[in-house]
Amino acid sequence: MPKGSKVTQREHSNEHVTESVADLLALEAPMDYKSSQMSMNMAGGGPPPIGKPDISPDLEDGRPAWNSKLQYILAQVGFSVGLGNVWRFPYLCQKNGGGAYLVPYFILLILIGIPLFFLELAVGQRIRRGSIGVWNYVYPRLGGIGVSSLMVCGFVGLYYNVIIAWSIFYFFQSFQYPLPWSDCPIRINGSQAIVEPECEKSSATTYFWYRETLNITSTIADSGGLNWRMTLSLLAAWFIVCLAVIKGIQSSGKVMYFSSLFPYVVLFCFLVRGMFLKGAVDGIAHMFTPKLEIMLEPQVWREAATQVFFALGLGFGGVIAFSSYNKIDNNCHFDAVLVSFINFITSILATLVVFAVLGFKANIMNEKCVVENAEKILGYLNSNVLSPDLIPPHVNFSHLTSSDYAEMYGVIKIVKEDSFAQLGLEQCLLEDELNKSVQGTGLAFIAFTEAMTHFPASPFWSVMFFFMLINLGLGSMIGTMTGITTPILDAFKIRKEILTVGCCIVAFFCGLLFVQRSGNYFVAMFDDYSAGLPLTIVVVLENISVAWIYGTKRFMQDLEDMLGFRPYAVYFYLWKYVSPVCLLILISATIVEMAITAPGYNAWVQDLASERFQSYPPWALVMCFALIIVAMLPLPLVFIARHYNWLPDGSNKLSVSYRKSLAKEASNLEDETRFILGKNPSEAPSPMPGHRAYLGPGSSSPVELITNSTSISGYGSSYQTNPAPPKSES
């Protein structure tokens, strides 16, 4: 019998020892919201210790478990490593000081990324429920945290799978030589064959993206009807996702072996191939040339914090859902550090690949610029607009280099200063090409595809690239879907197959909004408004509920019980002070940016063959803010409903696992009671607990465990007749 159990404490007290387990259980107070220790009524009881949740550690509750630790790690890596690592992180590096951007990113990864990731892993693993059940358990009044997470997962999943659909379309289009976006289409106008004007004004890859793929309208108000090719691609994307998650972690875990590892194979292949391309070194050098002065700008730190925040998938519920299928003694601290650094290294690897390829593209475009402008100069020489004396004698137009052109350009600009602008010559600097920042769909479907048209065996590399994007997106979608289905399966008795198929069907029909001809504008809207602010608020409330309401000291002690070792004391300060402050600053900065930035979108204007910023019409503006409000609405609604006891306390719905472990504990108590009653008091086990409570960094006194214990044997309810009231921690 463990030391410090209820029975031994009662043996050494003056109270009468109840001889029947039934009598012991009869002394239990009914678990209602007002008086139960399962709730955190500040005037009453405290929340149950996370350290001993309502499950049996030997997985006898029937809850699925990961087949191996590797499968679990790959699932977390697949969820956190997504499309943002490929097309968002490189853009932020280029925009915010090159290699210098890595410094604020790494600092914020340590200060808020790893601690909050560790926190979500720990609560999910110990309580073994989805996001809704976890936060109902920790603090029922903030049970809306889990509902908001689920709703944000739903919003994000709707448009995120559309990106997978685009990748599927490009994947099948890549099985052609030459690639269909290599050249502009030719239009027959009577007896003449002319290049499509829209394509000629932009580029072949830009035209293929906006006209052939999206067939986009010029405004968000003009839906244009469904794009049937994108509709079929979206159907295929949801079919793949459904197959991957239909059996829960039994099916998604096996998929992760491929979907998590294959992108690394492709990235390494692209990196090796890219290093042999002309100009690749220029791109990488440009990327990692630090602009230290930019590090002092607040905008850089805000964007670094946002990227850290979303790179790890915090607040979505997927992290909690995946960890809830772990063994109770799994070292989640090691997992948090490992996955965080894998994510960081993947971002750097993807950045090397992107800028090696973009460096190659910049050289191609710079050479094209030199050739076009050299032809202009030859024309001016033949028409005597320019004198041959302006051309340096060593310049050979048949083998013109960038340096030769730069020398010519400089001489002509000085001599023809008054009329130089009329010549229409461009400077053709490689630096200008490298400074053209692209992100998101512009990077993947325009810039990267254009670079690949110049690769030898370009269809092969295109197939590999878009297959990689499909797998990156699939890994994130599996985590997103798990964040949706796990809380629902925990709350309701539904077959996971029926729930998964139902969710995918509903999501497909809702996703038809994004495969209209104007669908790209709605993708941008959902990306800007449905996740950013709501998720940040969700995570700061997660942090506050654990660190300030449940209590950092108690949480640290629970972690020691679970892991078998005490986490570093630095986590105490990070959870309690640093992370909440950083998140509140991030929320404030996000609100300020939304207030000063005009809501709008970049519309593709067919006549101009370019993008132009347009403000949202009133109905779309209402839709933007409705996304934020709907995602955050469960937070105040659940708080008010539970405050006035209009809504049952979700934590009091004992799961099958809780009842099993309670019955098992009761059986053990009955055997131990008989053992104690048959022994002399001197032979009874010592009432001193086997471990001391964690009182914060630097504390050493174990007295508080005895005098202020809120529960023994780890459950929110107590076997003591007169339990001591819980000590509220600030």
Image (cartoon, grey):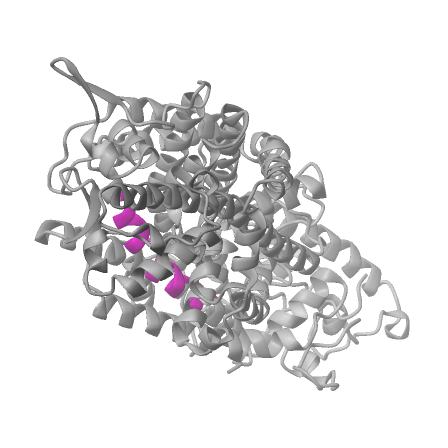
Write down the quadrant of residue 418 in the picture: bottom left
Give the x, y percent position of residue 189: 13, 18
- Relative placement, left or right, of 103 versus 16 is left
Whether residue 124 is visible:
yes
Give the x, y percent position of residue 624: 21, 54
Q: Nearer the viewer, residue 476 or 576?
A: 476
Image quarter of the N terminus: bottom right
Q: Nearer the viewer, residue 461 or 570?
A: 461
The prevailing secondary structure element of the residues shown in magenta is helix
The mark total stands at: 0
Q: Is residue 408 above or below residue 220?
A: below
The residue drawn where x is 71% and y is 43% is: 69
Write down the quadrant of residue 168 in the picture: top left
- Relative placement, left or right, of 324 versus 188 is right
Q: Nearer the viewer, residue 440 or 254?
A: 440
The residue drawn where x is 15% and y is 50% is: 620
Q: Nearer the viewer, residue 335 or 295?
A: 295
The residue drawn where x is 45% and y is 28% is: 242
**Would residue 539 be counted in the magenta stretch?**
yes
Whether residue 653 is visible:
no
Q: Is residue 218 above or below residue 707?
A: above
Q: Is residue 192 above or below residue 697?
A: above
The residue drawn where x is 64% and y is 34% is: 257
Outermost residue toward the top in this view: 191
- Relative placement, left or right, of 706 versus 422 is right
Give the x, y percent position of residue 96: 44, 66
**Would residue 705 be counted in the magenta stretch?**
no
Give the x, y percent position of residue 401: 48, 47
Q: Where does the magenta region start and end? A: 523-542
